[in-house]
Image (tube, rainbow, N blue to C red):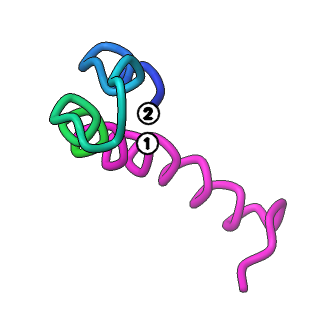
């Protein structure tokens, strides 16, 4: 997520109303979700992480 946000310029946006912030966020959040999904799935299956 941080890598995508950095590459798209979201981290360097002057404020949250600047378009580059939202463009970075639009791609960074799904990237972070997709990167974490298999790890969390594996941890829950192995009972190394509790599920609510």
Between discs 1 and 2, the one toward the N terminus: 2
In the image, residue 20 lies at what x, y percent?
A: 20, 29
Where is the N terminus found, in terms of image quarters? Answer: top left
Disc 1 target residue: 32
Which residue reaches farthest bottom?
A: 52
Residue at x-position 45% and y-position 40% = 35
Separation of disc 1 and disc 2 at Cα? 4 Å
Secondary structure under tag 1 reads helix
Work out whether 38 lies above or below 14.
below
**Closer to the camera, 51 or 20?**
20
Over which residues does the magenta segment extend? 27-52
Given residues 48 and 29, the one toward you in this image is 29
Q: Which mark is residue 1?
A: 2
Indicate the secondary structure of the residue bearing disc 2. loop
In this picture, is 4 found above or below 37? above
Front in this rendered view, residue 6 or 45: 6
Q: Given contact means CB atoms under 8 Å apart, are the residues at marks 1 and 2 in contact?
A: yes
- The answer to which image quadrant residue 22 occupies is top left
Neighbourhood count class around disc 1 (C-alpha, 10 Å): few under 14, some 14–19, many 20 upward? some
Q: Is residue 44 left or right of residue 27?
A: right
- The residue sitting at 41% across, 23% down in the picture is 11
- The residue that appears at 22% across and 45% down in the rendered structure is 26
| Residue 9 among those drawn in magenta | no
Q: Nearer the viewer, residue 35 or 1?
A: 1
Residue occupying the point 28% across, 18% down: 9
Relative horizontal placement of residue 17, taking residue 28 as reference (left or right): left
How many discs appear?
2
Residue 51 placement, left or right of 30? right
């Amino acid at each position: 997520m941080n890598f995508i946000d950095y590459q798209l310029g979201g981290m360097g946006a002057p404020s949250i109303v600047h378009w580059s912030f939202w463009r970075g966020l639009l791609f960074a959040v799904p990237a972070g979700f997709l990167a974490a999904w298999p790890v969390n799935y594996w941890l829950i299956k192995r009972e190394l992480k509790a599920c609510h």
